[in-house]
Amino acid sequence: MIVPKLAMTSTGVTEVAAEAVVIGITQDGDSVGLAPGAEAVDAAFGGELLAVLRTLGATGKPDEVVKVPTLGRLSAGMVVAAGLGKPGADGTVSAEQVRRAAGAAARGLTGVGRVVTTLSTVDLQAAVEGTVLGAYTFDSYKSESKNGTVSRVELASPADGTTKQHRATLKAATAIAEAVATARDLINTPPNDLYPASFAERAAGLGRAAGLEVEVLDEKALRKAGYGGILGVGVGSSRPPRLVRMRYRGPRPRAKVALVGKGITFDTGGISIKPATHMEEMTSDMSGAAAVVATVVLAARLKYPLEVVATVPMAENMPSGAAYRPGDVLTMYGGKTVEVLNTDAEGRLILADAIVRATEDDPDYLVETSTLTGAQIISLGRRTAGIMGSDDLRDRVAAVAKATGEGGWPMPLPEELRGDLDSKLADLANVTGHRWGSMLAAGIFLKEFVPEDLPWAHIDIAGPAYNNGSPWGYTGKGGTGVPVRTLAALLADFAENG
């Protein structure tokens, strides 16, 4: 993980010893406007900064970054104008607009070591998160590191000065962004180095360093306890599966929260093998697990007044002479039986085991996240997660996801689809046998393993977890770390409201 160091500064932005000053610009009809915090910079240009930016073709649209040499007018040698997009009806910009502009600016500052930003005067938390995540790079496998992103960022103090609350916001926002970066690191690690045993070891190391209680079940312990789903999926690989349990006990907890994340370290589809095209992206099939591991460690770092227990199943889905087959019947942890109709619907099998184990802790809430279905991408695209579960918690999670900027859409669990999961041999089948409502059917399958009186939510991040396109905002190529910020905000909500 390579992230910049951040600090608040009360020194005027025109005087800070930095290489660049970041300001925000907005779309103002067919023109461009200056965001708050840029006044001193504009004054240094004799009030002509907007004219200069217009000459350079600036529009203020999202992800736009325009660089202007200062020619000695400021201590910094360059002004970096980051597009915020159109303000709202009240003339303000949203936190996500600030976050995205800060990220775009950080991505555009290759080779610049020290920066001062005025976006912190608009929204401090969003500026911190966007800057850290935009500056994130993963170059562990480069023979020569080419990292040239920002190493230090001075955050201009808000108009009322740096207060105790501002320092707390800086600390929390930095911790949240670094948790996202931790998840990204895990996702971006190639599957020859991140497999169930090594993933479990890394998760355990992170947990113990944070003071968590950690338990790791190897294949022998899984077999003894009857984790048929995890064992069934993992049996085809030479690298046996694992189940990691991480527990954080906060001060005077207001709620007990179970987190579950899918940890398929590589997914070939098994006997129901996937097409070769883009199969390399299946290194990201453990993104849900990465997010959950990072989040429970974050809970400890921020000392949420909660008890948070993460249950993380890890397996590699491979075809071999020992692999599970279409037609097999697996006995899941807890005793339910599942007929396997498609070995590429493996995530729900390991999650079913983990969900049942997680419910044995008698949590107040259960939240699970996974790159579960390609149907999520077909239904909602690559940036919008599908959120299912019990109605109240589903809607609560969706609202939090929207507020964080990660996004998500509440989806139904239609009763009529349950009959399509009936099996002639077992309690249920792992797929319906048709394509219609496949994302919803996967949620219905998981529902079978959740007690009726337990509030629960399932977040399908098949698209949002991995960016295979061009970078945008604070999101580079590769693992995104979604939905760490949603989970963090949800925990904060539980801590405040129970």
Image (cartoon, helix red, strand yellow):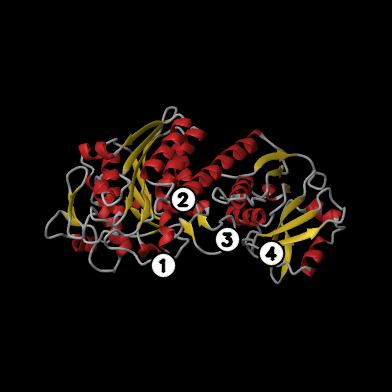
Q: CA distance from mark 2 to mark 4?
A: 33 Å
Q: CA distance from mark 2 to mark 1?
A: 19 Å
For label 3, the SS is loop
Q: Quadrant of residue 162?
A: top right
Q: Amino acid at mark 1?
A: Thr
Residue 100 shows in the view: yes
Q: Amino acid at mark 3?
A: Pro
- The residue identified by callout 3 is 471
Foreground tag (2 vs 1): 1
Q: Is residue 13 above or below residue 53?
A: above
- The residue identified by callout 2 is 187
Specify the quadrant that holds the N terminus. Answer: top right
Q: Amino acid at mark 2?
A: Ile
Name the N-terminal-most of marks 2 and 1.
2
Q: Is residue 370 or residue 490 the one in the foreground?
A: 370
Name the N-terminal-most of marks 1 and 4.
4
Name the N-terminal-most of marks 2 and 4.
4
- The residue identified by callout 4 is 60
Residue at 51% across, 34% down = 301
- The residue identified by callout 1 is 277
Give x and y (percent) for residue 489: 48, 45
Name the N-terminal-most of marks 1 and 3.
1
